[in-house]
Image (cartoon, helix red, strand yellow):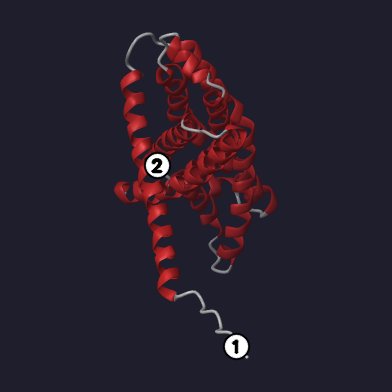
């Protein structure tokens, strides 16, 4: 009788090599994406100051990114302020410090939450549309048609979208803070019995203009980052409808991660 030799299991060095190769490929993709986004940003900056100035395209994107996001940003800000006031009041009641609800909500909204949440709302609503639209134009060769007609696609397609993100997200951040403070005031005064004078006075005492400036600057940085990432992913999409969907998914993930990473970095620089 012949004896069968048992098959050898996969060697650990082979699995380790595959893991290292996968990590290296992912790292290369991340570095390539960052380099591509930075390069695209430089191209957008260069073409944004060259004639012809396509103001009609710019105003259309300002309307789409900013005006079209007012409802969702305002509604999100309103309920964020209401929830935050409700939760902080429970904690401050333990120390008989309910008067600090107003300034706590104000500082948190203006410094952090307003810019982050506004950028996330714009990412989900406008950023995904940017990426999908540009990706569809790329795979259907509409971008190539623009180049054939001697129209620079970066100036015609990307500059208005990037500028819209840069200009409108800070404005939406201010809207978010205003709606959030309105919701917090309603909950604190009507629901929790805090004196309106105490709420407003303590908020004015602790909230300073630099806190508002920090949120606005963060909103501009986030808007620029989201617009560049979504435009880059859509502009370089390939592989038909499946490739456009994959590019949009990657753009959403990358944009969300960039918001949180830049939030830490900008906050570190400004403090």
Q: Quadrant location of residue 70?
A: top right
Q: Pointer 2: residues within 10 angstroms few (<14), some, or many (20+)?
A: some
Viewer-proximal residue among 185 and 160 = 160
Residue at 50 percent across and 53 percent down: it is: 104
Determine which residue is flagged by label 1. 2
Closer to us: 238 or 171: 238
- Give the percent coordinates (x, y) of residue 33: 39, 42
Toward which corner of the image does residue 150 lie, by quadrant?
top left
The N terminus lies in quadrant: bottom right
Marks 1/2: CA–CA distance: 57 Å
Asked whether residue 264 appears in the rendered view, the answer is yes
Q: What residue sits right under mark 2 in the picture?
A: 33
Q: Residue at x 33, y 40 (%)?
A: 35
Sequence-wise, which precedes: disc 1 or disc 2? 1
Above or below for 46 versus 11: above
Residue at the (50%, 32%) spot, across then down = 234
Residue 5 at x, y percent in the picture: 55, 84
Q: Secondary structure at mark 2?
A: helix
């Amino acid at each position: 009788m012949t004896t069968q030799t048992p098959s050898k299991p996969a060697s650990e060095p082979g699995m380790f090599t595959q893991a290292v190769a996968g990590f290296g490929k992912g790292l290369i993709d991340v570095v390539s994406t960052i380099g591509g986004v930075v390069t695209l940003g430089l191209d957008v900056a260069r073409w944004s100051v060259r004639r012809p100035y396509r103001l009609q395209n710019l105003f259309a994107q300002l309307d789409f990114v900013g005006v079209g996001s007012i409802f969702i940003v305002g509604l999100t800000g309103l309920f964020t302020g209401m929830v935050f006031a409700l939760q902080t009041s429970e904690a401050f009641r333990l120390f008989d410090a309910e008067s600090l609800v107003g300034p706590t909500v104000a500082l948190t909204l203006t410094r952090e939450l307003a810019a982050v949440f506004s950028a996330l709302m714009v990412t989900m609503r406008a950023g995904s549309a940017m990426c999908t639209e540009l990706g569809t134009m790329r795979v259907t060769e509409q971008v190539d048609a623009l180049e054939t007609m001697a129209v620079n696609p970066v100036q015609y397609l990307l500059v208005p979208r990037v500028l819209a993100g840069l200009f409108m997200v800070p404005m939406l951040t201010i809207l978010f803070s205003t709606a959030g403070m309105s919701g917090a005031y309603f909950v604190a005064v009507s629901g929790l019995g805090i004196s309106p004078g105490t709420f407003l006075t303590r908020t004015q005492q602790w909230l300073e203009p630099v806190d508002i400036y920090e949120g606005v600057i963060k909103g501009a940085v986030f808007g620029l980052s989201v617009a560049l990432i979504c435009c880059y992913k859509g502009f370089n999409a390939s592989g038909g409808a499946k490739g456009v969907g994959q590019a949009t998914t990657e753009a959403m993930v990358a944009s969300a991660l960039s918001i949180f990473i830049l939030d830490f970095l900008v906050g570190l620089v400004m403090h």
